[in-house]
Image (cartoon, rainbow, N blue to C red):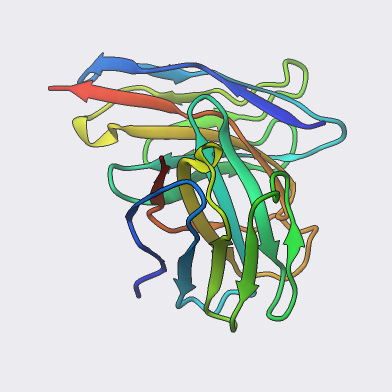
Amino acid sequence: GDSVTQMEGPVTLSEEACLTINCTYTATGYPSLFWYVQYPGEGLQLLLKATKADDKGSNKGFEATYRKETTSFHLEKGSVQVSDSAVYFCALGRNNNDMRFGAGTRLTVKP
Amino acid sequence: NAGVTQTPKFQVLKTGQSMTLQCAQDMNHNSMYWYRQDPGMGLRLIYYSASEGTTDKGEVPNGYNVSRLNKREFSLRLESAAPSQTSVYFCASRTSGGAYYIDTQYFGPGTRLTVL
């Protein structure tokens, strides 16, 4: 069945460092791919998404490109801030009643 | 707008006790979901309700029941809690009632449940 594997954390970076959180998926066909973020004490919220191969999702300086040839959707940001400290979830959806989430990666950014 | 709210935020139960987790959304969404999150396993779908009056099993429904009380509210009940149900529970909702359009899900802040 469909599944998502993402980089284990925790990840600790200094402010202004570059971020990459790896995400790979296993699925047949053409699912949509998502990154959700969970800030402390809050629910998950959508960060970005891509619905077809070679699409790039972007939001708040984060980017991820849907790579079908490598079955990947890595999350990147060029310069992280303390306010980016959160847990990041990669997810795959074929429809909204069957979403598969990765285990989450905790990011801590130090000043 | 409050979005998706969940009560309680924390709960400790003894094995065999029952409880109901409450979820409400004020965004007039059709579909609502219950997930559990366990370390190293991501979120797994327990039950969902595609529209008011309907409920369906997800990936891990055993040991749970749900009620879609009205369009706003979707509750999750543990009839006889077990230590294996120790987890963080998230409720979510989304706009469309259709199964094949990927719409954004909106999540509540979660309920942390411990079963001793």
Residue A88 in the image: state x and y as whole percent: 44, 33
B30 to B87, vertically: above or below: below
Q: Residue at x 77, y 67 (%)?
A: B98
Taking depth in this image into account, of B63 and A60 the one nearest to the observer is B63
Residue A22 in the image: state x and y as whole percent: 54, 18
Taking depth in this image into account, of B6 and A38 the one nearest to the observer is B6
Taking depth in this image into account, of A107 and B83 the one nearest to the observer is B83
A57 to B113, vertically: above or below: above
Image quadrant where residue B1 sits: bottom left
Image quadrant where residue A62 sits: top left
Image quadrant where residue B94 sits: bottom right
Residue B20 in the image: state x and y as whole percent: 49, 65
Taking depth in this image into account, of A85 and B44 the one nearest to the observer is B44
Residue B12 in the image: state x and y as whole percent: 35, 49
Picture quarter with the C terminus of chain A: top left
Picture quarter with the N terminus of chain A: top right
Q: Residue at x 72, y 15 (%)?
A: A70
The answer to whether residue A57 is left or right of residue A81 is right
Q: Residue at x 66, y 29 (%)?
A: A66
Question: Furthest-bottom residue in view?
Answer: B70
Can see residue B104? no
The answer to whether residue B111 is left or right of residue B73 is left
Can see residue A86? yes
